[in-house]
Amino acid sequence: MKTVHSCLNLFINILLSLTGQTLVVPSQPLVVPVGSEVTLPCQLEPVKDLRDLVVDWARHDLKPRYVHIRRDGLDLLIDQNSLYLGRTRLSEHGLAYGDMSLTLSRVRLSDAGTYHCFIPQMDTRAEVTLFVISLVSPVSVSPVSVSLTKDHSGSPVLRCESRGWFPEPELVWLDSEGTVLTGARTEAQRGVNEETFSVSSRLSVEQSPGNSFTCRVRHQETRQSRENQIRITGEKRHASHYSLVTE
């Protein structure tokens, strides 16, 4: 009974000592190339020894959601998502100083997402966002292509498309002054057996010969972009004579 009482007091003291703790993580997403090794930072402040506590890393968009689990001083990976098998580790030395950062090796495109670091006894968690870019993206990304069609009234409709992007890109149309145009119908698709995205967009434009337009496909996070600037030529009164010039 005395032993049980002592253990209970110890447990209560541990809980009390952990009040007011927070997990500190990067305020901005991490951007890493595929195939690299990355450490997702997660630091307990003020510092406490985490070696004998339960610490979890998870992605809530996966089933099972666990990326790495530690229980009673041991890595308990029976419930780990198979996508991460043999690719995650925590630092024993770091845990002693409140550092539960997760190292992920051989990064894949599918590793992109939001990761949650969690200490259940404290009910304390934080999020780390990871973006993954392809090392071969400058080669694998197709040029931005633009074609010209017409709607039922004969007015010009521009179509823009590009393939091979990861993560999902943003597509915008700009006029000759660099102003972003609205009203385009844009969609991104990901093949069943592919990790990259294809993006396409249709934009109805005014029947005004000489108008210049730019289709730009870009990643906000990685600052990668490709674009194609085009100009509509032809007689306004002859819609069938409209043509497209790539500049």
Image: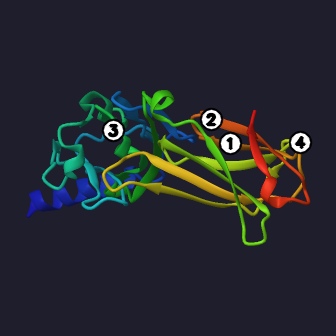
Where does the C terminus fall, quadrant-wise? top right
Q: Picture quarter containing residue 99?
A: top left
Q: Is residue 213 above or below residue 154?
A: above
Coordinates of residue 117 in the picture (x, y in percent): 38, 49
Q: Is residue 8 left or right of residue 110?
A: left
Q: Is residue 152 above or below residue 156?
A: below
Which residue in the protein does label 4 denote? 177
The circle on residue 225 is 2
**What whole-number distance in Å separates the C-alpha atoms at marks 1 and 3?**
26 Å
**What whole-number distance in Å separates the C-alpha atoms at marks 1 and 4?**
14 Å
Which residue in the protein does label 3 denote? 108
| Residue at image location 85% in from the left, 49% down from the top | 234
Amino acid marked by disc 3:
Arg
Which residue in the protein does label 1 denote? 216
Alpha-carbon neighbours of circle 1 within 10 Å: few (<14), some, or many (≥20)? many
**What whole-number distance in Å separates the C-alpha atoms at marks 4 and 2?**
19 Å
Describe the element under mark 4 as helix, strand or loop.
loop
Amino acid marked by disc 2:
Ser
Q: Is residue 69 visible?
A: no
**What whole-number distance in Å separates the C-alpha atoms at marks 2 and 3?**
22 Å
| Circle nearer the N terminus (4, 2) | 4
Residue in the foreground of this view, choosing between 81 and 45: 81
Alpha-carbon neighbours of circle 2 within 10 Å: few (<14), some, or many (≥20)? some
| Circle nearer the N terminus (4, 3) | 3
